[in-house]
Amino acid sequence: MCFNSYPKTGSWKEDKDCCTWDGVVCDNSTRHVIALDLSCSWLSCSFPSNSTLFLLRHLRSLNLAGNNFDYSLISPEFGRFQSLTHLSLSHSGFIGEIPYEISQLSSLVSLDLSYNWGLSIKTPFWKRVIGNLTQLRELLLDGTDMSSITPNSSMMNLSSSLTTLSLPGCNLQGTFDINIFRLPFIQNLYLEYNPDLEGYLPKSNWSSNSLKLLSLQFTNFSGELPDCIGSLKSLESLFLSSCNFTGAIPTSIGNLTQIIHLDLSDNSFSGLLPLSIFDLPNLSGLYLEENQLVGPLPNHVSGLNLLIDLSLRSNFLNGTLPSWLFSLTSLVRLTLDHNQFIGEIGEFKYNNSLDFLDLSYNMLQGSIPSSISRLVNLTYLSLSSNNLSIMDLELFSNLNNLNVFNFSYNNLLVSRNKNLTFTLPNLYELYLSSCNISEFPIFLRIATNLRSLDLSNNRIHGQTPKWLGAVGRNSLYFLDLSHNFLTSIDKIPWENLYFVDLRNNLLQGTFPTLNVLNLQHLFASNNNLTGEIPSLICNASSLEVLDLSHNNFSGTIPKCLVRSNVLSVLDLRMNSLNGTIPSTFSKRNKLRNINLNGNQVEGLLPRSLENCRHLEVLDLGNNKINGTFPYWLGSILKLRVLVIRSNKFRGHIGNPNTKSPFPNLRILDISNNEFNGPLPKRYFKYLKAMMNVARGEVGLKYMGDEYYNDSLNVTMKGLNIELVRIQTVFTTIDFSNNRFIGEMPQIVGRLKSLKGLNFSHNNLTGCIPSSVGNLTNLEWLDLSFNKLSGEIPKQLVDLPWLEVLKLSHNQLTGQIPLGKQFNTFDNDSYTDTWDYVDFR
């Protein structure tokens, strides 16, 4: 707000005429002080209610904006200035209710109380403003809390002289009075950032001769854009982004010949783009992104000569890119990503002004045009996720200002030229993922300022080049070399790295030397790394995700990993780790996922695991862990996945020792152990997440975060399957291959979100409970290899998704039910079950 601030009062001298003081204006005849401008004057103190300022009763203009009055209340004494026409207290740290005395200043022409974030307006004050300030032309209340004001009725009688009404971020709620749009002299109307403010644009009787600026962005205005919008001949700026407007953009928009900024982004506008919008002669910024617009762009335009910024991203626009796009001499930013454009990229007509070009996520094809080398001012270039095929690196030799270079996800044929000598000295980010490249780009050699490097999913073989360590030596923070054929990395020297991904390579030997000081995410899974987990990992005090799975690491689990108060994911599965799980889990740890599956870990589970209050996934399967069922894990309320299959657990599963154990558990696998006794029906009683069927959710959701997807091996429909991502609604119980006895409890039928239930290979007796017919989401049911008797409940016929049923090797009697899914099951479902009639 303050572009030229300095302490004005510092130059005031008592022995000099106050009318000569900086910021003071006096009446030429009476010598009364009539104006005081102390804006941006470094005033920092509580505002005194008895200030001598209030003795200046002839003041007509008072500006105290841009100071710091340290959360003071606005003094009622401001009401003394009966001659005041201009009052500005903006950006000055006032709080509390605005005193009603301000509303008594009936001569006010301009009132600016904006950006005092602790101010509020109550209904009585607002009514007085409307009733008394009849000469008001400018009212600026940005950021003032007006949540108690009803905007549909209380604004009807605002001063008809208003030219500017500014109410952004005022927490206005309810329906806005459309008559404000009809005030005869209104020029500027700011209502943005009031997300609960509803309304629509009037279809007639606008103040068409005066309105210059209308801003409704981030409100809840809705409806269609009326055709009469084209009658606002003086309109220069229209900001309607992030509202709920629908329908087509009217062709009358082309009548706004004075418009400079047009922003209709992030709405639900649909249909074709009106051709008239491309003929606006004064347009500087056109923003139509995040809508549902369809169709091609026009082949020719007659306007847009002054266009600087064009954004049409995230629509359904199609067709080829017209040549005029590359001929706009004033264009600085061109954003067309996430559409359906096809064909080749045209040649650029000496557009030296272009700074930002994003054509990503389309269906463009062919080679990169040679004229791209003319865009010498380009700082951002993204052509990712297209079907581009040929790229000559020499084309970019002139782009010395390039900061971001993204060609990921194109099946490129990249020219290989060992004689390339050019550099991109200002390159900060390089993304060449899935580009079919087979070597490290040579122009990186002198990219000393590089911050982010992504060469993942390519065909790069062998060892990393020695010069790579000098690339972005003091700046690189993101490195992704995953899914290549790298066999060796000498060291990873970058001291500011926070993200390293080396997954799915052919790395051998011990883990490379790594500077871990700032490291937050480390992925090195699916390699051939050996030796112990390096002790330097213990120096990574900021490490949040550690994935070293699917290697050949040996030795014990470093104790420092369970003592961390930062680590969220610890994935060490499928290695050769041995020893016991460290027993010193911190009470303040943030572990969300612990996966030690497929190692040789032994001994008892440490009780300190109970300290992992954020734990959602615990997979300890396929180890040598022993002891009884860890009932105390039931107190971890966020736990969704518990896998202890294929260990040496034994004994009865007793009664729970907490009131509601495992309330969010959805995956429970204790198979292939030595548990015995009856099935734990009291635990089934509290599996709340398994009882609740998710309804009304839009789209699939998965467990994990932006960088790490939770994954799991499960026995599913009789097959051992790796779920590379776990749906949040996926629910299964596997108690197979133990020594459970007794009957299946009826309460199992309450676990209605179950997709899979496996009690096979136990010694269960009695009947299959009819309540199993309530499991309407069930896709597989395996009760084979038990001693179950009685008939198959007819209720099972009505399970709509049941795909796999295994009841073989039991002692069932009676006939097999007919109909629906049961007509799809073959004889293997019932082999060696009984002698019965009508065996199908």
Image: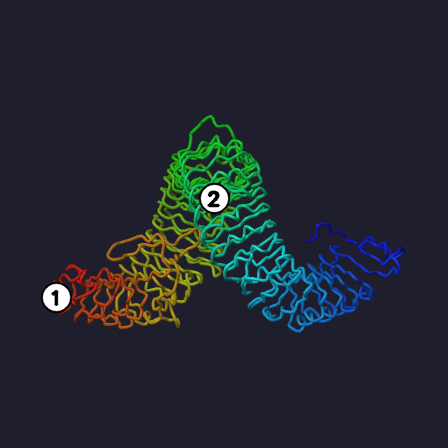
Left/right of residue 435 with respect to residue 4 in the rendered view = left
Q: Residues within 10 Å of mark 2 (few under 14, many from 20)?
A: some
Residue at left 70%, top 62%? Answer: 137
Q: Say if 777 sits above or below 580 in the image.
A: below
Q: Residue 834 carries which label?
A: 1
Mark 1, secondary structure of its residue: loop
Quadrant including the C terminus: bottom left
Q: Residue 692 carries which label?
A: none
Left/right of residue 140 with respect to residue 573 in the rendered view = right
Q: Position of residue 616 (x, y in %)?
A: 40, 60
Residue 603: name its quadrant. bottom left
Q: Which residue of the protein is positioned furthest toward the top in this rendering? A: 419
Amino acid type at image mark 1: Trp
Q: Residue 298 carries which label?
A: 2
Mark 2, secondary structure of its residue: loop
Q: Distance between the residues labelled 1 and 2?
A: 75 Å
The answer, for residue 115, to whether it is visible in the render is no
